[in-house]
Image (cartoon, rainbow, N blue to C red):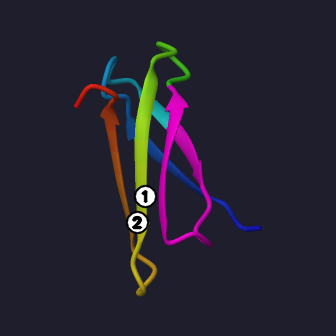
């Protein structure tokens, strides 16, 4: 399995965090804890047919 690595900013502490993404699933939504502040981040990933990734991260109360 080929995972993609993407760096995003935590919506709580604004620190950069590294996500490992599975591009074999076109639409994903999951919770991952920030490595810095340990708060839960909602991650939504959409892979377009052209292979482009759209990643959205937000707090659980947004």
Horizontal side of residue 38 vs 24, given as left or right: left
Dot label at residue 45? 1
Vertical placement of residue 24 versus 49, above or below:
above
Determine the residue located farthest toward the left in the rendered image: 62
Between 49 and 27, the one lying in front of the other is 27
- Name the residue at the top extreme: 37
The residue under the point 56% across, 22% down is: 35
Give the residue number, with chain letter if any, for mark 2: 46
Work out whether 55 lies above or below 35. Answer: below
| Element assignment for label 1 | strand
Residue occupying the far right of the picture: 1
In the image, taking residue 49 as reference, residue 14 lies left or right, namely: left
Residue 29 part of the magenta segment: yes
Q: Are marks 1 and 2 in contact (CB under 8 Å)?
A: yes
Question: Magenta region's main secondary structure?
Answer: strand
* Relative image position of residue 59 (x, y in whole percent): 32, 28
Q: Quadrant of residue 22?
A: bottom right
- Name the secondary structure under disc 2: strand
Q: Position of residue 23 (x, y in %)?
A: 58, 68
Residue at the farthest bottom position: 50
Residue 5 is labelled as none
User: What residue is shown at x 46% (from left), y 44% (from top)?
Assistant: 7
Q: Residues within 10 Å of mark 2 (few under 14, many from 20)?
A: some
Give left or right: position of 6 versus 55: right
> Is 25 within the magenta?
yes
What is the span of residues highlighted in magenta in the rendered image?
18-33
Give the side of residue 38 with respect to residue 10, left or right: right
Q: Quadrant of the C terminus?
A: top left
- The span from disc 1 to disc 2 (Cα, nearest Å) is 4 Å
């Amino acid at each position: 399995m080929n995972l993609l690595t993407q760096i995003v900013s935590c919506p709580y502490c604004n620190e950069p965090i590294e996500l490992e993404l599975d591009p074999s699933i076109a639409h994903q939504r999951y919770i991952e804890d920030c490595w810095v502040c340990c708060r839960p981040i909602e991650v939504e990933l959409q892979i377009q047919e052209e292979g482009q990734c759209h990643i959205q991260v937000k707090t659980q109360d947004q």
